[in-house]
Amino acid sequence: MARMVGNRLRTVAKVLGHLIAEDVGWSRAHRSEAHSGLEREQRRAKAVRQALESLGPFYVKIGQILSTRPDMVSPTMIAEFENMHDEVDVQPFHEFEPVLAENLGPNWKRLFDDIDTLRPLGAASLAQVHRVTLSGGRLGVIKLQRPGIRETVLADMALLRRAARMVARGAPRFSSVVDLESMLGNIFDAMEPELDFTKEAANMDQARASVGKFRYLAVPEVVAATPGVLVQSMAPGTSVGRIDPATLGDRERMAIGRELLAFMYRGYFIDRFYHADPHPGNVFVAPGGPATLIDWGMVGRIDQRTSMRLLLALAAVGQNDGHGLAKAWTEMGRTTPWSDIPGFSSDMAALVPKVAFASLADLNFGVVLTSCLEKASRRGIASSPSISLLGKSFANLEGSVRRIAPELVIRDVFEKEIYGIILNLIRETLSPQQMARRSLEGLLACTTAGEQLRALADDMSNRQISVQVSQVRRGRALGGENPSSQYRGLLVLGALALYVSRRTSGRS
């Protein structure tokens, strides 16, 4: 058994190494063979795709996420991954009956008037979904976790973490820019509800509380939830990926598109809890009814400061400010000793004017995101580990909205929503909890001021003051935290509050 785990670990580490071969050095011996370089890279990309598929659907999902990181994966690899598929065999329904009995009890059949056991609605790597008729004739769906899959996935996660550490030791320069282990941890945390449906049900309840503010959006109702079984109401209509937009009126199409964007903005910047996979297959629409977001097993959560910096980044794009985008992006991540901040600012200044005023028909956010990631990496700037999941979420959302309302301009929707977002941030900043925190920070600063003065006096008496100043300056040059930077967010919010109040008074 240990030998099997060891062999699988080496295989996974080798695949990860091949994914980042240009940085790790796997293909350096062949760089001089320019005439055969592209063909060699294509063969390597195909081999990596096939290896991931052979390792199982879980690794296919990881590969699909990694393929959104051009700072890690070559363009040839990304193109090859478009052919990646995670076909999962449909299991006979009777193989799930022990799961039903364990989770719902031996009399589980009494909970349903009917179950379509022959034609599942979907078969994924972790679960299978069937149509059911609930007691009283109401339509619903039942999501069944594949037997033994939780233990398998947890073992795969542990294996991937170990493989990531092996790759990091062999590629220190790459690892200083891309924290592969932290990025995988962020993804694994988002996937956790897929292994325990009670957590997915809690996600649905939380999302339903937020979506209630939107007229054209809905989230399915949870009927019953256990770790291995989830019963929920049926999402009406057809997925955005299959519906003919002509079946919806223009006003309805545009309203759904705007509300989908607004709902996700609220998730990123107010709730800091968002659907991580809103692709066209997870958004159902029906003429005359709301659009329903399904599959809440993979969600993202984002901390306050990262959320605010992401907001500043999007605001910079909307205002055609490439240098502002570069600053916000850098602050979301971190710098390295060889970071080229002016170069990255110039890159963003060249990129932003091309996308600031584009409609969804002309703009591919995935291209914008990948450009930021690629150029940041090339300039020695480490992007935030949360960017992978955020980028996947926003790119999938964009794809869904483009299907029904391609003429929407993201900038217009964002500008309309940003006022409400800022007001929420101001209320949060001025809340008793935040004020208490700021007071504690101030008291701590006062308490430590005396110690700092005594240390400064000692340094001066020992004639070491020049050395200390030099160390401070060097720390800042390497991206160290400026003590005053913790209050920068408050200053920004204050300026935004003043701007909003002036706009509001100007309209009245």
Image (cartoon, rainbow, N blue to C red):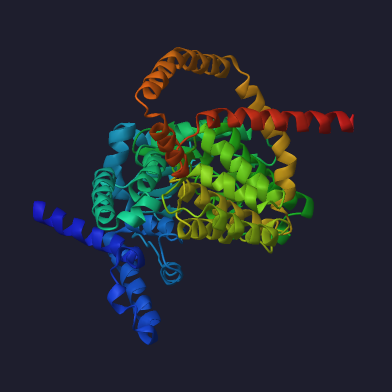
Q: From the viewer's perspective, is residue 426 above or below residue 419?
A: above
Seen as rendered, the residue at the extreme bottom is 35
Q: In this view, does 441 lie to the left or right of 44?
A: right
What residue appears at the point 53 percent right and 55 percent down from the top-left corner?
281
x and y percent of residue 47 in the render? 31, 72
What residue appears at the point 66 percent right and 26 percent down from the top-left corner?
426
What residue appears at the point 34 percent right and 81 percent down from the top-left corner?
32
Nearer the observer, 297 or 3: 3
Can residue 337 be seen here? The reply is yes
Q: In this view, does 304 lie to the left or right of 259?
A: left
Q: In this view, does 204 lie to the left or right of 45?
A: right
x and y percent of residue 453 in the render? 44, 17
Nearer the observer, 390 or 154: 390
Q: What is the quadrant of residue 72 in the picture?
A: bottom left
Q: What is the quadrant of residue 83 in the picture?
A: bottom left
Nearer the observer, 364 or 212: 364
Q: From the viewer's perspective, is residue 451 above or below residue 43?
A: above
x and y percent of residue 24 in the render? 30, 63
x and y percent of residue 418 in the render? 70, 38
Can residue 219 be seen here? The reply is no
Q: How many marks?
A: 0
> Could you tell me which quadrant the C terminus lies in?
top right
Q: From the viewer's perspective, is residue 448 above or below residue 346?
A: above
What residue appears at the point 34 percent right and 53 percent down from the top-left corner?
175
